[in-house]
Every structure is written in C-alpha cells, then in structure tokens.
Image (cartoon, grey):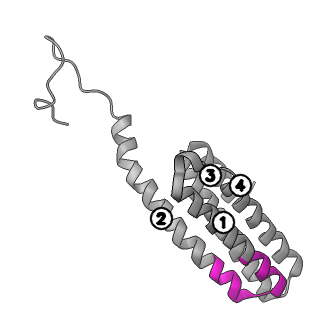
C-alpha cells in the first residue's frame, strides 16, 4: 500500500471540518503540480486526469459552502472556485504551464488562510480536551486557586 495514501486516510479520519478543507486544498494543489509536471513531459493523458481530479475536488469544496451561515465569505469563496475552475479549463485547452502555475499560486494563498484558521482553532481544541480541575473535598475549587 502507498504510505502517502495511508497517511492521508488517517489524517482525514482524525480531521475536523476546517482540517478537511485544508486537506482538500492540499489535494488540489498536489493534483495541479502533477498536471504541471505532465505538461513539461508532454503527457496529455496525465495532465487531463490531474486537472479533472482537481476540478472535482474544487466542485466538492464549492458544493459544501453554507451560504446562509457563511454569508459574504461563502459567496466570495464560491466566486473564487468558479474562477479557479475557469482558469483550469483554460490551462487545459491552451496546455499552459503558466496558467497552471497561476492557479496553484491562488490556491496556495487561500490554503494558507485556511491553515491560519486551523491554527487559531488548535488552542481551543487543546483547552476543550483538558480534563476539568479536580474538586476540593469541600466543593469545586475556584478558578483563582487552580493552576496547571
């Protein structure tokens, strides 16, 4: 079995929703890097396969947007996904490494923003996983008297 696939499957099973978005971005970027390499080799079949997979993943990201809760951010992301897909179709038609590189760059910028969201949630997740402070014999300890 491919160790990268095993690692990715384990990461998906343990990921929270933001973590899943980060993983999907990483998949799209990886697909497009492979497509870029295929352009360099003149491998039309591999380029097409990788771009098509990236488009499917982007469609999944777009389909899961919650425009009611996400508001303007979700609407903006929807437009971004439309733009990336259009750029990928153009890159495919023109067999353009430059256009693929542009889409990778755009995706990496948004990926980094999602990573920031993920990092900002990490302290909250650690705090939520900490056990509650022990109870004193006469009742609960005050927050001031507790130190970790």
* Residue mark closest to the camera, 4 vs 1: 1
User: Which secondary structure dominates the residues rendered in magenta?
Assistant: helix
Nearest to N terminus: mark 1 or mark 2: 1
Image marks 4 and 3: residues in contact by CB distance under 8 Å: no
Q: Position of residue 76 (x, y in %)?
A: 57, 63
For residue 81, the mark is: 1
For residue 65, the mark is: 3
Image marks 2 and 3: residues in contact by CB distance under 8 Å: no
Residue occupied by mark 2: 113
Where 12 sits versus 110, above or below? above
Image marks 1 and 2: residues in contact by CB distance under 8 Å: no
Nearest to N terminus: mark 4 or mark 3: 4
Few, some or many C-alpha atoms within 10 Å of disc 2 (few <14, some 14-19, many ≥20)? few
- Per the image, is 125 magenta? no
Q: Nearer the viewer, residue 146 or 113?
A: 113
Q: Tell me the SS state at disc 4.
A: helix
CA gap, disc 1 and disc 3: 11 Å
Q: Position of residue 121 (x, y in %)?
A: 41, 49
Q: Position of residue 144 (x, y in %)?
A: 11, 32
Q: Is residue 15 visible?
A: no
Few, some or many C-alpha atoms within 10 Å of disc 4 (few <14, some 14-19, many ≥20)? few
Q: Where is the C terminus found, in terms of image quarters?
A: top left
Region of the chain picked out in magenta, as a range: 87-103
- In the rendered image, the residue lying farthest to the top is 138
Where 55 sits versus 106, above or below? above
Q: Nearer the viewer, residue 145 or 9?
A: 145
Q: Nearer the viewer, residue 55 or 135?
A: 55
């Amino acid at each position: 079995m491919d160790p990268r696939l095993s690692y990715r499957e384990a990461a998906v099973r343990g990921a929270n929703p933001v973590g899943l978005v980060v993983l999907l971005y990483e998949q799209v970027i990886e697909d497009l890097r492979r497509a870029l390499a295929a352009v360099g080799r003149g491998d039309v079949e591999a380029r097409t396969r990788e771009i098509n997979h990236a488009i499917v993943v982007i469609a999944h990201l777009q389909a899961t947007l919650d425009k009611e809760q996400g508001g303007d951010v979700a609407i903006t992301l929807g437009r971004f996904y439309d733009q990336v897909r259009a750029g990928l179709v153009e890159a495919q038609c023109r067999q353009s490494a430059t256009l693929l590189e542009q889409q990778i760059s755009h995706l990496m910028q948004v990926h980094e923003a999602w990573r920031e969201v993920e990092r900002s949630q990490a302290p909250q997740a650690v705090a939520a996983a900490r056990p509650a402070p022990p109870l004193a014999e006469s009742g609960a300890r005050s927050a001031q008297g507790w130190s970790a």
